[in-house]
Every structure is written in C-alpha cells, then in structure tokens.
Image (cartoon, grey):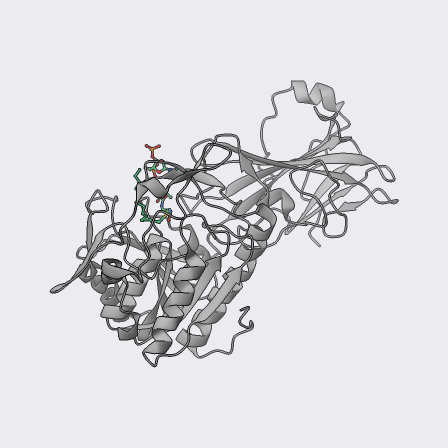
Amino acid sequence: MGQVAALSLSRLSARCWQRLLWPGPARIPGGLAARSLSSMATSIRFSPAARSLFDEPLGIAVQGLGPRQQVTLRASLRDEAGELFEAHGRYQAADDGELDLARCPALPGGSFSGLEPMGLLWALQPRKPFWRLVKKDVQTPFRLQLEVLEGHGDPPGQLLAQAEHERLFLRDGVRRVPVREGRIRATLFLPPGNGPFPGIIDLYGTGGGLPEYRACLLANYGFAVLALAFYGYEDLPKEMKEFHLEYFEEAINYMLKHTQVKGPGVGLLGFSKGGDLCLSMASFLKGITATAVINGSVANVGAVLRYKDITIPPLGADAKRIKINKSGIADIVDVLNNPLEGPNRRSFIPLEKAECRFLFIVGQDDHNWKSEFFAVEGSKHLQAHGKEKPEIVCYPGAGHYIEPPFFPMCAASMHLLVGKPVMWGGEPKAHSEAQRDAWQQIQAFFHRHLNGKPSGTTNKL
Ligand SMILES: CCCCCCCCCCCCCCCC(=O)SCCNC(=O)CCNC(=O)[C@H](O)C(C)(C)COP(=O)(O)OP(=O)(O)OC[C@H]1O[C@@H](n2cnc3c(N)ncnc32)[C@H](O)[C@@H]1OP(=O)(O)O
C-alpha cells in the first residue's frame, strides 16, 4: 500500500484552520503534491500515493480515527472550466480507528452506499446542471481533493484531514503527436518505444471539438491511437451537414503508412455518432480489421454520408416523438425512425460489405436512441449475409455516455443537434460498473484482433 500521502501538520484546531485560506497543496520535494490538514493522528493514505491514471482504481484509507468514529469523506475536483464536481460518503471507522474504503461500506445518506472503494470518484456530480466531466488538456491531471469531516451531520463537522491526489491521463513515456497532415485534424498517441503498435482510430460523437481523453487512456495500454476530429474543429466543417468518407480514408491511410503502427489493418472505436461513422468506414473502406462501437447506430444519422458516387441519407426523425420526463428534460429515445421500415432502409449502413470483426457495447438504459435494437439488428443483418456474428455486450442500467472507467455518469446535458438538454439514461452505480467492464472488453477485443492475443474476457451476452 502507498505510504501516507500527506504531510501531517502540527495540531491545528480544524476550525481555525478552516478560517485560514488553505494555500493549496504544498509542492513537497519528491513531487508528493499533497498536504494534509490533520490533527496529530488523522491522516489520509492514497494508494498509489501521489498520482494515478484516471482509469485506474485508487486505494483510499483514513488512519488515526477513534474506534468506530463516524466521519464523512468529501471528494471534489474542478474541471478545466472551473466547474466543481463533488461526492461524499458517510462512514464509520473500524474498532482500530482505521477506515479503508476497500473494506468498509459507505452508510446510507451519502452520494452512494455499500462497499464502493471508488464511489467517491464515480459518484462525483457537477454543481452546474447539464455539465459533463470531460478532459480537454490530457497533459495535465485532474486534482482530486479529499476531506475527512467529523460526523455525518449536514453541514458536516470539523475538518479532520485533507489531501490531494493527481489523476493523470498520460502514462509516462506515452507521446502526444498533433497530426495536421493533408485534411486530417487529429492527435496521435504513441506508447513508449518504437513499436510497431496496433493502431486504433477513435471517434467521439456530436459535439465537435477533438476529445482526446479516451484515445490517450487507451494508448496507455500499448495501442497507437488516433483521436480524430471530423467537424466543428479548426478548418473542418463547422456543422454536421454531410460527411465524406474520403476524409476518414485519409486517416486510415495515415495510420497504415505510419512506421509505428502495425498492419495489416487498424481498429476503429466509435461512440454515438462516431459509432455509425465507424460502421460506414468499415463497410466502404479498406484496411480495417476490427470495429468497436459504443452505443452507436447501425443507420447513418444526423448528416448525409457520401463516398465516391454513393450517398446514404440520414435516418429520419420526428420531433413530435420527443418526450419530456418528470424533471422536464427532453427524452429523445424514440425520435429516430425505424431503419428497417420503408424509405428509412436507405439509411441502414451496408455492414455486409465490411471485412472486419465487430464489437457492440450497449447501454440498455441508453436514452439517446435504441442502442440494443441497433446492435441486434446489425447482428441479424451480418448473419443474414453470411458474415461472422458480432460480439454484443449489453449492460443493464447503463446510459448513453459509456466513458472510460470512473468518469462520473452524465445523466443529462446539451444535445447540440437537438438544441436542448436531453436525458442520456443510466443509473450511476450500474453505469460505473458498465464502464469498467466495457473498457476491458474493448481492450481485449482489439488485442485479440489486432494482435492475435488471447483475450482475458468472455462475451457477456
Ligand atoms: C428540436 C428538433 C429535434 C429533432 C430531432 C433531432 C435529431 C436527432 C437525431 C439524432 C442524430 C444524431 C445523434 C448523435 C448522437 C450523439 O453523438 S450524442 C452526443 C455524443 N457526444 C459526444 O460524443 C461528445 C462529443 N464531443 C464534445 O462534446 C466536445 O468535443 C467537448 C468534449 C464538449 C469539447 O468540445 P469543444 O468544442 O472543445 O467545447 P466548447 O467549444 O467549449 O463547447 C462547445 C459546446 O459543447 C458543450 N460543452 C462543452 N463542454 C461541456 C461540458 N463539460 N459539459 C457539457 N457540455 C459541454 C457546450 O454546450 C458548448 O456550447 P457553449 O455552451 O459554449 O455554447
């Protein structure tokens, strides 16, 4: 276990300390960026001590409490927009005054309850409504603050200990390489060493920008991962009006030409709108060995898709099917037409043309659209054309935003196509468990098909 990650200060009355402006973590020689406000006894122990990768479990323990002392642990972090995310757990120390979250269940009344060693992270929720935890600069960590407060009161009692821990996105030695080659607007993450490494192209969905955080976390596991922007970024089209697969073909060729990317083909990882783009890439473009889709659609959605003389229209939608849930938030799960019916079939992506293996990750409480229906119909379509059955992994209680592990679930946020906040679905605990398993399934899928390595997991469905 990690050593105490905090410098115990002289006995200060916590209340008087609270009146002091906490100067923030001291830069302690050796990089231990943590400071604990503590009485002589109480201290916080993180394991690893000072920093860990965002998708790694973190050991949290408190020492020096009284036997069965009741305390509240409060976690918080600020994102790069300065927005605050918080969670708290109510605990009772063991007879020896130790509190180890790996062994001690959270009591009712906090942000979570039960034996949840990572509850203080996955249960973080923003103060700002409809706000999602995203990491824009993957070269800097999130700084997790942890406080130990006396009792279970509200407001909580005196501050007994405080410490900070850095949650990183880049493992030592992983290289971040901006890519501005031809029309490509992307960032390539390369593991340490010369490779060549199995290559993956990572696409997010509607929202524009260039989210890098899933790509870099995946590169930490030995993949060369290209986070690819496709609209709403630099000189790319500003709006989601139409996409040309030739742009994505350039990205595939860039990867296959790269000396540190192992051929003969690359993997594709797409989420939401990025998912149907990956399915279209797999269906029309060469050089793709494995395609994993997280809550994607098997029909082209949201924009016209073109490739050479081919055009796939976006699946129709009917705003009249937008429901308003009891919290007054839009529920668009039924908005899209059925891609099996009538003219909507023109939007169904011809998956049978693909020469790759497929993995569908499904949140069964996805409220952006019917992800399980899409995965099952995609599987039927492939098998009807004599193709391999895809892997489908379904997660009960998981919503739309299945992110890397320990990202707090986003229940609702602005849908830039719908123009208003929508509910994404999911129940936080189930969603968090889904994120952890899906992350393993995705890595095993790509190792199996890009590396020929045996996988460590089996199909859940
Ligand atoms: C009524 C008629 C309906 C009819 C019917 C419709 C059709 C219906 C059919 C469905 C057809 C397609 C369905 C697609 C399905 C998906 O794709 S659902 C969406 C999936 N989302 C993703 O994959 C995330 C994609 N990426 C992103 O969101 C952005 O890259 C990031 C990560 C937010 C950063 O982007 P950025 O451009 O660097 O960010 P920035 O410029 O700061 O912000 C842009 C906007 O994003 C939002 N945003 C930014 N940061 C955050 C944050 N942390 N938290 C929350 N929001 C944020 C804000 O809204 C912001 O706008 P402003 O408030 O500034 O005006």
* Image quarter (top left, top right, bottom left or bottom right) of the N terminus: bottom right
Task: Tell me, yes or no, if residue 51 can be seen here.
Answer: yes
Residue 257 location, quadrant: bottom left
Q: Is residue 59 toward the left or the right of residue 167 in the image?
A: right
Q: Residue furthest left?
A: 309
Q: Residue at x 76, y 31 (%)?
A: 152
How far across and how far down the image is residue 334, in percent?
A: 39, 48
How far across and how far down the image is residue 219, in percent?
A: 43, 61
Task: Tell me, yes or no, if residue 255 can be seen here.
Answer: no
Q: Please state which of residues 315 and 41 is positioned toward the viewer in this rendering.
A: 315
How far across and how far down the image is residue 221, in percent?
A: 48, 64
Q: Please state which of residues 134 and 434 is positioned toward the viewer in this rendering.
A: 434
Q: Residue furthest front?
A: 342
Q: Is residue 189 toward the left or the right of residue 396 in the image?
A: left
Task: Count all numbered tags in the image, as a single digit.
Answer: 0
- Does residue 9 sit above or below 180 in this rendering? above
Q: Is residue 373 toward the left or the right of residue 29 in the image?
A: left
- Does residue 33 sit above or below 268 in this rendering? above
- Does residue 282 sit above or below 264 in this rendering? above
Quadrant of picture, ligand 1: top left
Q: Residue furthest bottom?
A: 386
How far across and how far down the image is residue 35, in percent?
A: 65, 35
Q: Please state which of residues 232 and 337 is positioned toward the viewer in this rendering.
A: 337
Q: Residue at x 21, y 63 (%)?
A: 250
Q: Please state which of residues 172 and 321 is positioned toward the viewer in this rendering.
A: 321
Residue 351 location, quadrant: bottom left
